Structure formats: C-alpha cells, structure tokens
Amino acid sequence: MEARLESLTGLRWWAAFGVFFYHMANLAPLPVSELLDLGNYGVMFFFVLSGFVLTWSARPGTTVGTFYWRRFARIYPAHFVALLLAIPVFYSVSPDPEQWWVKPLDVGVLLLSVLLIQGWWSSPVVFFSGNPAAWTLTVEAFFYALHPWLQRVLAVLRSRGALIVAIALLVLSFGWRMLEFASPAVASLPIPVPLSRLAEFVIGMCLASAMKSGWRLPLPPWTVLAGGAALAFVLTYDAGTAWLDPVREFVRATQTEWVLVFCTLLIASVASRDALGGRSWLRHKWMVRLGEASYAFYLVHATVIYFVLGFVGVQSLGWWGIVWYPPLIIAALALAFALHLGVEKPVERRMRRWWDARLERKQATESAARHGGDPR
C-alpha cells in the first residue's frame, strides 16, 4: 500500500484559495489584478493533481464499476447540493440587466449541469450553467471515465517510460500553442474543453506511475516555488526592462504551458518529499483539514461572492477593496465546512458502504452457487 501524501492535501487548499482570489476581482478588484488572475490556474493544478492521486491510490483488483461508483460518491452529492444553493444566485425568472451574472431560468440548460455534461458546450450560457464553478466537474467526469483504461496502459511502463510520456505531453503542449499562433485555422478548431485539458490529467497520472516505480524528483519544493515566483514576476511585472521584453513576450504567449510545468514540478517535489519522509508544514492538521474541505470550498465560493455582489455591487478599484476579502473567505469556509461535514463525507461513506455490501452479497451468492450451498 502506497504512503499517504498528506502535503498534497494541504496544497489543494492553496489552489482553491487562488481560484477564490481570481473570482473576487469581480466584486472587489485590487491594484494587483494581474497577479490575482494567476489564481485561475488553480483549476489546472486540480486536474494534474487528480490524475496523480487517482493513480497513486489505485489498488489491484478494484473493478471498473467500483472505481466509477466511488468517484460518483465522492463528487456528486456535494455537487448537487451546491447546485441547489447556486440556482437562486445565478438564475431568475426576470433577470436584472445590470446583474450580468444572473441568467434567465432555463430548466433544460440546468439539466445539463445536473448531468455534469455542460462543459462539452462552448456557449458560456451552457458552459457556466447551474453552479458556474461546476464546469470543471464535467472535465473530471471525463477523466474518471478514461482513468481505468489509461491506467492499464501506464501499468506496462516503468518510471522512465512514464516520465518520457509526461515530458512528451509537455513538449506537445508548447508545440500546439506555437501552432495556434502560426495558424488561425488551428486556433479556431472547436475542441471541447474536456479534451483540451486531458494532457494535464495524464501528466499527473504519469508522475504517480513513475513514483510508484521508485522515481523521486531530486528538487526540494522551495526551489520549485522560487521558480514559480520568478514566473509570476515575468508574467505580471511591466517596468521598463528592455532586455527582458523578448523573454517576457515568449513566456506570456505560452504562460499556460509554463504554469503546467510549474504545477507538474510542484506536485512531484512535494510528493517526493512526503514519500521520502521529509518534514512539511503542509501536513499540519489544519492544512490537511482545509485541503479536505477544498472541494466543497471550490463549489460554494462563487455562490458566496456573487450573492454578496448582488447586494453591494462592484467596488471601486483600490486597496480598500481588501476589506471584503476576510469576511467572504470566512463565509465561504463556513458554508464549505457545512457542506463537507454535513453532505460530502457522510453521504460518500453511506454510498460506499452500500456498494461494498452489495458486492459482498453478490460474491456470497456466486460462491454458494458454485458450491451448492446457502448464501446466507
């Protein structure tokens, strides 16, 4: 059984926290908006981490049906409740034109969100339907559907093979971005978002597969974080530094791919530190608790922000806007922990117990049939 990498759970909180700051700009924009915009890449971190965690925790003998049910039990109950909370905030029978985030009530569109397929549409009205944050669950559901089959392919690769696949995907990501700049026809291809984000998930899978084969990244997390800080500097700093302009231009043109490299290295370095038994403040009990509630926090944070926005409107750009951040973080956390402790975890446990009991009864019946006995 593989070791628990609790530091990755702590990292999940910071990714969700970054997404919160990104969306807060719609309520209380700050003078460092370019820096806060980078919080949107927390979603990318989640996709890479999802591939890593599912592969790291995979156990021999787990059936495809069991895997799918466990994933459904993990994400759907909290999603459904968060959707119910979001509908009154983001929908109205007669929307106010000044509240651009409120859409006309459309049961058909909402049904797509209930089924977690809204992310396959390019129209923003559909893509961000229901709970706007839940488009990522469409992507995750697609990843979950593919994981058992991708896992079988990776299982035949050793650490070197898995790392080669990960590096190849990173290189291809840069290459595709360059091709988009060179060819407007390529840039306009209608590629569904779940397909366009698949490489992030597979890279995470490759990292976990390589680590399960014994590979460890020989970089301490602080060096990766320093690299991330340098990347953020290049992406956001505009002072007169002519010598830096060519570098900045290239990095900004390919910033999504550079952030993907950063997420990949950060997950690998933190996971390697945990696997080697190194110390990490990310394993502190409160970091782990926040990380465990990060999914619920992600689901409700936009609902809290836009609920308040509906009452107070967009605030003026300036540092005074920071006063809105602490109370909204506290409100979103309170709602997130209520969802996490009241719905997400208990319902998941019950659904998993029901499935496990069903499998036990099925196995007992089959065993009795083979031996001609009574299954009771």
Image: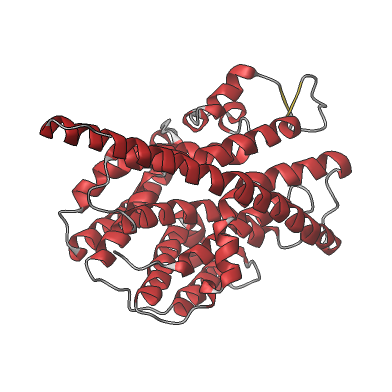
Residue 83 percent coordinates (x, y) = 63, 34
Residue 370 percent coordinates (x, y) = 12, 32
Which of 55 and 199 lies nearest the eye of the viewer? 55
Q: Can you name the residue that lies furthest to the bottom here?
A: 279
Residue 247 percent coordinates (x, y) = 48, 67
Q: Residue, x 58% and y 41% (percent of image)?
A: 78
**Quarter of the figure that contains the C terminus:** top left
Q: Residue, x 61% and y 30% (percent of image)?
A: 129
Indicate left or right for 285 with 367 as reference: right
Q: Is residue 32 above or below residue 175?
A: below
Which of 290 and 203 lies nearest the eye of the viewer? 290
Which of 337 and 352 lies nearest the eye of the viewer? 352
Indicate left or right for 277 with 31 as reference: left
Any part of residue 278 in sight: yes
Q: Residue, x 52% and y 68% (percent of image)?
A: 231
Q: How many marks?
A: 0
Residue 95 lies in quadrant: top right
Any part of residue 187 in sight: no
Residue 67 percent coordinates (x, y) = 34, 42
**Quarter of the figure that contains the N terminus:** bottom left
Q: Residue, x 44% and y 51% (percent of image)?
A: 47
Q: Is residue 40 above or below residue 197?
A: below
How has the structure been colored for display?
secondary structure
Indicate left or right for 264 with 59 as reference: right
